[in-house]
Amino acid sequence: MVRWAFDTLEIGITKDKKQIKKAYALLVKKYHPEEQPDRWSKIHEAYEAALRYADGMETEPRGDSWSEEQEAYSENVEAEYGYGQMFEEAQAQWSARQSEKLEALSARLRELLSLPRHEAYDEWQHFLASEFLPNVELTEMEIFYEALYRNALPPEVAKLIGVTMEKRRELYQYSMELEKASLADDIMGCVCFRVPPYEAERKPGRLKRILKRLAMGAAAAVILFVILAAVTAKDGVRDAKISGTILAYLNEKYPEEEFSEEKIQIESTSLYGEKAENIVSYQVMPKEGSYNVFAYLIGDKGGKNFTCFDNLQEAEIKQAFQDSINEKTGHPEGKLFWNSAGGAFDCVEDGYFHEKYEGDLDNFFHMETKARNGVSGGDYTSGSSVLTGKNGAADYYIPDMEVETIEQRLNILNYAEDTVLKDTLNQCALEYEMQLQGIVLPKNLFAERTKRIEWGDYGTYVVRTLDSPFIDPPVPFLMTTGWYVNVPSDAEEYLKIESGLYVQNLVQMADGIYGTKSGINNSVVDFSEMEGDLTGCMKVTETPESIDISEGKRKKAVSFSLAQGYGLTEDYCLAIEKEAYGISELGYRVMLTEYREDVGDVTEMKVYTYSDPLGHVEYGDVLDGEGYLFVEYPRPWNGEKPAVLTICPQ
């Protein structure tokens, strides 16, 4: 019986998940979990029950007159008609969605952990306040715990997480979610004391501690804040020997600057996980002016040797690298985006370098690689959580000199490998000990995109991790005329990826609709591997009734779906010609209706211009450019009805 859930959410009984989520969002804004935990807990429980009902995992509400005989009859009918199997399939679909959600969380955490320090606090604060809410599941908290243990955090971020988890632990205690309360306690231990996860007899130990804390009450909170204050105070302790080391390094490297103790301040940096086992770190900031870390030191714990890195030449070095690779490839207009973080656990941060650049880039890279090899934890082949070359990873955008428009790109039937470009990029990757991706775009798209993606623009991210099941190019394969992946030869084995050209051949899926697979397995594309003939596999279909639009807009809407008899083993990126289907140049909406047990779940997709680096079809966005819409179409799940893609007037 789930009628109570919809009463709690203050809506009628429905399987429309959008309506359920909207009702939940309105209530949690009204009843904050840390201010009214009892009320919030009931709302959250109702929300989960309503979603289970919408997914077909709860039965229809029944009246009080439902008898035991009717219940028994229903069970017999369910058994006779295979409803048990339907439930198992629904459970499998739910598990698949859970897996996707956890993968998305892991990706978001990797993004947060790679942020420069001056951006980190605000982004983590936003994440904890609006994304990683108290209603997250236990498994999500486990992933959060693992990420914190295995990566370093700035002290201010560690303190933010510690205070947040203290409040949530109290909330979980109050609502008797003891496993969550216990794990929140462990997360505090991780960020404050570097306690590793998954100790022996972890769960019983956690529960015992949390039950004890239930009795201790407010005293525990007082103790925690005293400890946090002590940790913060400890971060401010300066070491005279360290000060001498960093001043000697800076003054030898930049004698014209005349660094002194009066100009800089040095603080110890908290490290976590495997970093904390062997490495210590100190950061350097100016005493006057805005908060800005311009140098840091890392070295062996208990040892005397430290390696210093600074970002005073970051812009100059990155510009020199772009100029050099442009000259070598013969593309003076090329744009290079380089995340120079490298080494196991990113011991060397993006934008920081040990060696001084004095005009000879090849010599600079040679010396920089040697310096990074000497860093404690710098063995990038052993246990690294982010797999890159020693000098990081770079994305290099260039225009295709033969292909100007998207329409010309869509007419390419077979790719011709640019062996000169491939060899040049591969040689740079080998010599400079880094991952290097060359992304070749039609000339118009390149011109539009590079208007928006300049150095440091928000939304432009270098593809760093190539160890996922599918490669994720910065733009869809359908919009590129080549994507060259190059990694150092000794890195191919542990990255599990080959250097070479990665592309996808195009399929005309209907008149005015073209498509390619969204991802490629970790091997250079084999053109002989095709999914069968998908020509003509898309059809125009009726607009789903579940889409809430007026009758007038429904008549003008156009909807597409996979035709009967066709199947997809992977998601496909589509290019839809707007003129062919009467889609207006501006003022339209795009909705995707996916089916679970024949119930349509409608999601409105955000539309970006195709030059906007924030838009990404694999994240559920629509790109618009040169008369085409670019959108991802998902493969059907476990025999469900194919999804319906709808474009209608605003």
Image: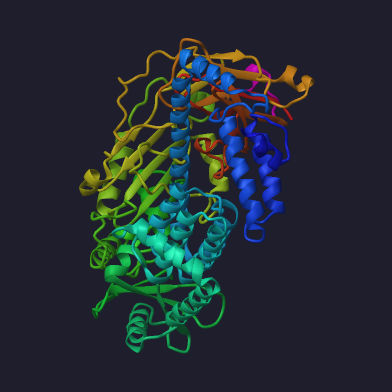
- The stretch in magenta equals 577-585
Residue 317 visible somewhere in the drawing: no
- The quadrant holding residue 290 is bottom right
Instruction: Say whether residue 301 is left or right of residue 188.
Output: left
Farthest front residue in view: 68
Residue at the spot 38% in from the left edge and 58% down from the top edge: 340
Residue 37 visible somewhere in the drawing: yes
Residue at the spot 66% in from the left edge and 25% down from the top edge: 647
Indicate yes or no whether the magenta region holds residue 74.
no
User: Quadrant location of the N terminus?
Assistant: top right
- The quadrant holding residue 237 is bottom left
Viewer-side residue, 153 vs 327: 153
User: Quadrant location of the C terminus?
Assistant: top right
Instruction: Say whether residue 372 is left or right of residue 625.
Output: left
Up the image or down, 533 lies above or below 636; here it is: above
Residue at the spot 33% in from the left edge and 40% down from the top edge: 485
Instruction: Say whether residue 208 is left or right of residue 597.
Output: left
Viewer-side residue, 234 vs 249: 234
